[in-house]
Image (cartoon, rainbow, N blue to C red):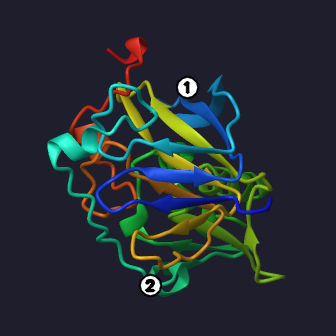
Amino acid sequence: MGKNQKVVIVKDGPYLVFGNLILAVEIAVVGEEGYPEKWEKGKAYPEQEKYALCRCGKSKNKPYCDGTHTSIGFDGTETADRTKYLEQAEKLIGPKIDLTDAQNLCSSARFCHLSGSTWTNVENSEDPEAKEIAIKTACNCPAGRLVVWDKKTGKPIELKVKPSISLLEDPQAKVSGPIWLKGGVELESADGTKYEIRNRMTLCRCGKSDNKPFCDGSHIDCKFNDGDESLK
């Protein structure tokens, strides 16, 4: 990771981003089965050494903070369980690969529903095609709720990505999704505590999650739109 690449949460305020982390849009593309099956690159934002991303969902300059959190009295209290991922997750043992699942991290991206579900394909992973689908769908889970593990090495099977930030869009649900931290970006709480570093994490940007700072899918219920006309 590059020097000082991190996200710091401001109490009842924005996410402060440091270290020239790339910021771009990624769009969930729906396949023939009627579920999202891949991520497509969208707009890229100008590179900046540091910037502040809206966390309350009400900025008029999304994705950036414009100070609106102060005028609306935004309550950004962090309520997420800080227990490490593996201590939260349930484990599914498959014939060729295993799966860990921390359900409370779910951001409702729905890639896991493809081809009978990630869980079913892990259970059927003696079939090379099922194994491949399980790995692909788990790796496309932006929240990192689902992680596939190599039985031989005992290590997670992860996409190798550079530290970066994506703003997710969900045209099928007609909503803007969470902020996707990729590649092990460091996340620091408003109280100075550092969250466990993970390869994939999704942060709430609609302001409605009950699992702050992480996304819990509330952007779908509140029909959050960051200003994308195509979602209307």
Could one spot residue 132 in this view of the protein?
A: yes
Residue 129 placement (x, y as % from top left): 74, 51
Residue at horizontal 51 percent and vertical 52 percent from the top: 16
Q: Position of residue 36 (x, y in %)?
A: 52, 35
Q: Quadrant of the C terminus?
A: top left
Q: Is residue 157 left or right of residue 166?
A: right
Q: Amino acid at mark 1?
A: Glu
Residue 224 located left or right of residue 6: left
Q: Which residue position holds label 1?
A: 32
Q: Is residue 135 left or right of residue 193?
A: right
* Secondary structure of the residue carrying numbered label 1: loop
Crowding at label 1, few (<14), some or many (≥20) Cα neighbours within 10 Å? few
Q: Position of residue 56 (x, y in %)?
A: 29, 45
Residue 28: give x, y in percent of width and height.
54, 32
Q: Amino acid at mark 2?
A: Thr
Which residue is under mark 2? 83
- Image vertical order of residue 146 relative to residue 22, above or below: below
Marks 1 and 2: which is nearer the front? 2
Q: Nearer the viewer, residue 140 or 3?
A: 3
Quarter holding residue 187: bottom right
